[in-house]
Amino acid sequence: AYEKIDEGRGRDELHEMALAYNDMMDQLGRNYEKQERFVSDASHELKTPITVIESYARLLKRRGFGDRNVADEAVEAILSQSIRMKDLTAQLLDLARSDQAAAYTFKQADIRDIAEETVRPMRQAYGREFSIEGPEKLLAETDPDKLRQLLFILLDNARKYSDGAVRLTLEEKEGLVELAVADHGPGIPEADLPHLFDRFYRVNSDRNRKTGGTGLGLSLAKEIADGLGAEISVESVVGVGTVFRISFPTNRQS
Ligand code: ADP
């Protein structure tokens, strides 16, 4: 909390300054709250794997070395929780960095190339169908690395949560680049849609538990979209599939 300056009634310079000051302090306050929430969410999420690792290490110390089954179970759990912690910390670091404006470097780039470069290694790694539709060349101003990272999150989710082909479409419409990542997977219940971009949010389903994700991917996607000056949205129908859309101006000045 801070002492608000009396904004007064007159439309004079002092009044403008008071308004600007109060706005700035509000903004700082919001940033501080965001930061605090981030730290508390992150600590909470990291606590679970640490607790599991600790209790299995204790079990191992107590009786693991005399009992092969206990030892196997403990080592397996310690390994999988360590990997989970590694993934979590890597994603949390990405998330912390992604809202720093200085982290973005914009330049003229071919969005088609960026799409191809993102998809190529995924086709190879998963032997799945990833199609790209749209113009052979689509020039726009963006940060190619960040856009690649954003597309990767959406394509990788489409792959994880569905079995069939994943389609990426590119389009240029009225000075906007429009990208869509579509799958014919299980879809997302309407009630979950408003929370998808929240940190650590995961839809509660069997498939979901098996993939062992962190629920951070889409919040990172949203932060990156903000940094890129892009809108991100989702449409989904249970049993039909999901489409994530990104749109941003071809030219940052216009
Ligand atoms: P994670 O994949 O690590 O769980 P995300 O933030 O990337 O975290 O996604 C949040 C949740 O949104 C996922 O757990 C999943 O339930 C749902 N989701 C995301 N993409 C899709 C998709 N293409 N199809 C169905 N569900 C999805």
Image (cartoon, rainbow, N blue to C red):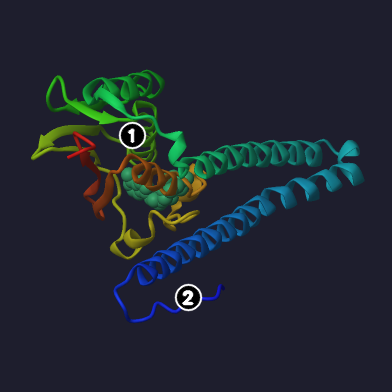
Spot occupied by residue 230 in the image (x, y as percentages of width and height): 28, 43
How far apart are the two marked residues, 2 and 1, measured between alpha carbons?
Answer: 44 Å
Can residue 207 be seen? Answer: no
Circle 1 SS class: helix
* Nearest to N terminus: mark 2 or mark 1: 2
Can residue 162 be seen? Answer: yes
- Residue lying at 32% horizontally and 26% vertically, measured from the top left: 128
Q: Which residue is mark 1?
A: 151
Q: Is residue 121 above or below residue 239?
A: above
Q: Amino acid at mark 1?
A: Leu
Q: Amino acid at mark 2?
A: Ile
Q: Nearer the viewer, residue 141 or 88?
A: 141
Q: Nearer the viewer, residue 193 or 57?
A: 193
Position of residue 103 in the picture relative to residue 172 (left or right)? right
State the residue lying farthest toward the bottom: 9
Q: Is mark 2 within 8 Å of ligand 1?
A: no
Position of residue 94 in the picture relative to residue 77 (left or right)? left
- Residue lying at 45% horizontally and 52% vertically, measured from the top left: 206
Quarter assignment of residue 132: top left
Q: Which mark is residue 5?
A: 2
